[in-house]
Every structure is written in C-alpha cells, then in structure tokens.
Amino acid sequence: MSQSSVSAIRWANNQLILLDQRKLPLQEAYVHCVTHVEVADAIRQMVVRGAPAIGIAAAYGVALAAAEFSSDRDRMHRALETLADSRPTAVNLFWALRRMRDLIDASSAADLFPLLVEEATRIHEEDLQANLTMGELGADLIAESGRGALLTHCNTGSLATGGYGTALGVIRSAYRRDLVTEVFADETRPWLQGARLTAWELCQDDIPVKLIADSAAAHVMKTCAVKWVIVGADRITAHGDVANKIGTYGLAVLARHHGVKFMVAAPSSTIDFELFSGADIPIEERTSDELKFVQGTPLAPEKANAFNPVFDVTPAELIDAIVTERGVVLRPNAEKMRKLQ
Ligand code: MRU
C-alpha cells in the first residue's frame, strides 16, 4: 500500500501487523495484534507512532474489538474508550475513532467486523492519497524558493503515516524534482525518531541526509543555506497553532530569526476545528526514565528529577505555510484556516 519500501502497518489474516518502531534501525521485528487492548498498548508503548499512523492502527483496533465481542455495541463503545486512552495529543487518533464509532452507531448489521475492516482500510488508503497530494503541493512551494537544503524534525515518513509521509512526503517529492541538495535530520531526543527512523527512511531512498544533534539546528540554519524547515503535526487548531514533537517550537523561532521558511505538512485529519488556541491542546508528558536512560543505559544521576513533555505548540504567527491535501494556507490565521474545513 505505501509508496516506499517500508510498511509500518499491515492488515493480514484478520490481524494487525505492526513494524516495531522501537527496535529500528537495528532490527526489523513485527508485533501481531489480535485484540484491541494489544493495539492500545502498542500505541502507548510506541511500537507504532506518528499522528496518522496511530489513528490508522486504532481504527483496525476497533475492527478487532468487533471480532472479540461479536459486535456487542456496549463492549465496542468501551473498546473505543480504551483505544482513545492510549495517547492524548495527536487528534488523528480521536478523528479515526469517531469515524469508526459513527459507523458502529449508524449500522444495524449483526456482524460489524467486515464493515469496520473496510472502513479502517479506507482510512489507511485515504491517508496515503492525502500524503501524495501534499507531497506535490509542498514541493511546489519549495520550487518557488529554489533548490536548497531542508531541515526536518522527528519522523513523518512512511513509518508515521499510511505511507509516503507528510513532511517527509514533501521532502520525497521535492527530491524527485531535484529541488533538494541535502536534508538535515534532527536526532529528536529523547526517542530519537530522527536518528533511528528518518535517517533510516532517507537512507533507504538514497536521499542525502545529514543527522544533526537537536542543539545544532541554529548553527546549521546560519551556516548551511537551509531554505525550509519542514515538519509534521499532531494537532492543528482552528487558528493555525500547531502541536508537534518537542523541539518544533524552538525550530520555528530559529527559522524566523534566520530568514528560513517554516512549513507544516499534515492531512486535514490533523486539524481540530473544535480548538482555537494551541494553549488548549493536551500535551503528553511521558516518564522521566525516557530522558534518563537510553536503551537501558542510565545517562543521569538516579536521584535527578526530569520533566519530559513530548510535544510543544508552535504559534501560527511563526508558520509560513500549512500544507494539507485540501490545499495550502500561507501565513495561517483563523480566517484562512476556515477554507480547509
Ligand atoms: O511521539 P511521536 O513519535 O508519535 O511523535 C510524532 C510526531 O511528532 C510527528 O511529527 C507527527 O506525528 C507527525 S507524523 C506524520
């Protein structure tokens, strides 16, 4: 289904098969989920991650619940809640679950399983199509400012989506059009999605990538002719504020200071028109151990406290373009965002 060699999410033999992203790039291992609780755990534990990908996985999780509970509506509603409890920030999760719930509530079928598998597959395929469209729209913007270097954060590629990627999809499309000299990938502490996943995807596609420490971004913007910072999103408000991986906000501030353009690429399923201000977006905090240890090795004194918010909010004012499959919004504000509704 995906437009690159990586298939992070697969439905086969009535199972959800997830590439275990915690183990990349050292190991390509798969987790087979046969219950909705296994899917919720896989999302919580980052086996599958990235806003669109967790929405897709959760949708298949709802289908699994129909098989587990013989389509019993009450138990299915509880399964929806369990899946919704897995992670709080990416709105794609709640968007996908709402689509599945609406189908459950509208259908009188005794067996919901085939309908729900079909709907989850549709969500999966639509996401891939949206990414291909965004890739071209984003590359058009890059073409206007000319060939140059790009900088990206976290992982927004095939692994994080239904295929191809959001920000990484734009990078892929721009590279195919010979608009990219090189890609700087932030390592993205503490989960190292940039080092482990983005560098892996770009190497597989033979797109020239240079991994940088997160703290090198200012220096790189100043000295390496970066034309665009391109990132994905976990939730975009009606005003155009953007929640994304921790560190994104800092990049936007740096980009504005250095005259580098800042692009957010995300499908319309990432827009939460019910929230106006980014201040209202729930920001996930994960355990301090994720900061204090790397793959079991301690990095800090045992007694040290740590604060580990894993997303931040970039205000609309710092964003030059929001690219969705419904179109591009330049210099977003509430009025311009409405055209995407
Ligand atoms: O914690 P993660 O790895 O799920 O965070 C992922 C991100 O922040 C991505 O940038 C975002 O989901 C967009 S992915 C297309």
Image: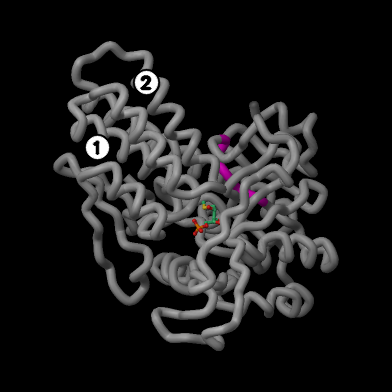
Q: Residues within 10 Å of mark 2 (few under 14, many from 20)?
A: some
Task: Work out whether 222 lies above or below 140.
Answer: below
Q: Quadrant of residue 260?
A: bottom right
| Residue type pointed to by label 1 | Leu
Q: Residue at x 73, y 56 (%)?
A: 262
Task: Work out whether 315 lies above or below 300.
Answer: above
Q: Residue at x 43, y 42 (%)?
A: 55
Q: Is residue 208 visible?
A: no
Q: Earlier in the sequence, mark 1 or mark 2?
A: 1
What residue would you read off at disc 2?
103
Closer-to-camera residue (219/69): 69
Q: Quote the CA–CA distance across marks 1 and 2.
A: 15 Å
Q: Secondary structure at mark 2?
A: helix
What residue would you read off at disc 1?
64
The span picked out in magenta is 264-268
Q: Quadrant of residue 96?
A: top left
Q: Position of residue 77 (x, y in %)?
A: 36, 28
